[in-house]
Amino acid sequence: MTEYSLHAYARLPRRYHDHHVMTSTVDAFGRAHWLLRDRGRDSLPRYDALVVSVGSGAAPHETRLSAVTARFPHLDALPDGCFVVADARNRTPDAGQVQVFDATGCCARTFRLGDAIEHLLVDESGELWVGYFDEGTFGEDELSCPGLRRWSAAGEPLWAYTAVPGADFITDCYALNVSGTTGWSCAYTDFALVENRPGRASLARANPVRGAQGLAVHEGRVAFFGGYQDDHDRLVVCFLAGLEVRTVGTGRLTRPDGSPLRSGRQRIVGRGPRLYLQHAPWTDWSVFDLSVV
């Protein structure tokens, strides 16, 4: 079986390792960000936090955020230097589930995106792509029910997924990749690969790969990562043929040193041809790049 190796991408400087990593991501422009808070203060309903940003060839940059409220946060950066912090769980219509912090770390505005957020990715234009898991799609929050939505950075609903020929309703948005301003999704139960372009009807392609949790796309090819049980490190490389996804080869994704990937919890960010992975203790990002395979 073919082995595909991850490559080391970004690392949280050691001087921050005594902080608690709340979450981490890689933005649309390739910068890695960590949301940190002091250890031992998890019970506070509001807390000050630190965003550490690491970009290619640049010194780490700090942004201190005041009065963060998210218990289960998602983080991403806007093109204008602001940060979005969203709580994955929210069942209170009037609550400030999403906070947008300006470059000085002050909360500039709040809004809601719906309960049970699985993915939050800001695209190159500054719009938010949000995928939801099943407790949202089957819940009572109408914001979550479509399973995948696109929002403005001010919290205005721009688009919501509806079933299209070749793809059913979204039960659980397993995988999401945002490339430019296009969102590629792969969702339970049929796992069709759906191309969602603003201003156009979504396009679904029949997909033989089941259970993938991450995907990368590049020039008519797609790579699906992950799966159920022993397929946690599976990588399936495919090409797009009309309305079908056809498998080219199946292999395993390994750590940068060639050792096997551990099963269990991980963070996955899909950005065009790149698939970024992170495992505990959440201080390092690795990358698989489909464009060089």
Image (cartoon, rainbow, N blue to C red):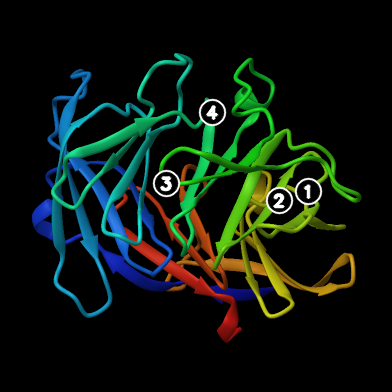
Between marks 3 and 2, how big is the CA–CA gap?
A: 24 Å
Check disc 2 and report its element: helix, strand or loop: strand
Local crowd at mark 1 within 10 Å, few (<14), some, or many (≥20)? many
Query: Dot 2, crowdedness within 10 Å: few (<14), some or many (≥20)?
Result: many
| Amino acid type at mark 1 | Phe
Foreground pick, 281 / 268: 268
Residues under labels 2 and 1: Cα distance? Answer: 5 Å
Q: Tell me the mark number nearer the camera, choosing from 3 and 2.
A: 3
Relative depth, front residue between 234 and 285: 285
Q: Which residue is mark 1?
A: 191
Does dot 3 land on a helix, a strand or a loop? loop
Could you say which disc has been placed on residue 153 in the image?
3
Return the disc, 3 or 2, that comes first in the chain's sequence.
3
Q: Is 248 left or right of 88, judged from the image as shown?
A: right
**Of callouts 4 and 1, which one flags the residue occurring earlier in the amino acid sequence?**
4
Q: Which residue is mark 4?
A: 116
Secondary element at image label 1? loop
Q: How far apart in space, not on screen, are marks 3 and 1 (Cα)?
A: 29 Å
